[in-house]
């Protein structure tokens, strides 16, 4: 006799991370309970309005802020940006980039070029 299949559950922080949203900005009913894989899939495929708004307007978690600014998470830390930023704040930084952002973008682009070069070299050797 087999056990009935139980859906795996995850902490709200894990679910928020998988949805690329900032946990403290989510509704309390999301923060206060475990989220099943089925619920996570449902949120991905048919997001409620709060999730649509959060993804559009923010505040956004560090990884999303870094990606939108085209820098690394470490670059944000070096710049002293520790809090979540809204879409509006990210757009303001991108529109008039401070010196640190210009420098970090150049560094990030250089690192990415080097990663691609090494990958191509490995592919040719392998």
Image: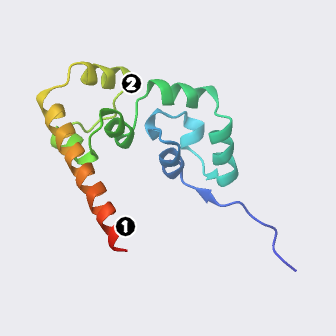
What residue is rendered at 13% in x and 36% in y?
103
Give the x, y percent position of residue 125.
33, 73
Give the x, y percent position of residue 54.
50, 29
Is 80 in front, or is 111?
Answer: 111
N-term-proximal mark, 2 vs 1: 2
Is 48 in front, or is 98?
Answer: 98
Tell me if I can see residue 80 in this picture. no
- Number of marks in picture: 2
Point out which mark residue 123 bears: 1
Q: How is the image coloured?
A: rainbow
Query: To which residue does mark 2 refer?
Result: 87
Give the x, y percent position of residue 57.
45, 23
The reply to whether dot 2 and dot 1 touch (C-beta < 8 Å) is no
Up-down relation of residue 37 to residue 89 (above or below) = below
**Disc 2 on helix, strand or loop?**
helix
Up-down relation of residue 50 to residue 10 (above or below) = above
Q: If the image is split into quadrants, where does the C terminus sit?
A: bottom left
How far apart marks 2 and 1 lie (CA) works out to 38 Å
């Amino acid at each position: 006799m087999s056990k009935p299949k139980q859906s795996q559950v995850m902490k709200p922080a894990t679910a928020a991370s998988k949805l690329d949203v900032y946990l403290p900005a989510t509704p309390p009913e999301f923060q206060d309970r475990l989220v099943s894989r089925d619920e996570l899939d449902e949120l991905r495929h048919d997001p409620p309005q709060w999730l649509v708004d959060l993804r559009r307007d923010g505040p956004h978690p560090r990884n999303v802020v870094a990606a939108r600014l085209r820098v690394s998470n470490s670059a944000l830390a070096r710049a002293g940006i520790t809090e979540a930023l809204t879409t509006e704040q990210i757009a303001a930084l991108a529109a008039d980039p401070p010196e640190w952002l210009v420098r970090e973008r150049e560094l990030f682009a250089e690192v990415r070029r080097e990663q691609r070069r090494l990958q191509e070299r490995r592919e040719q050797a392998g």
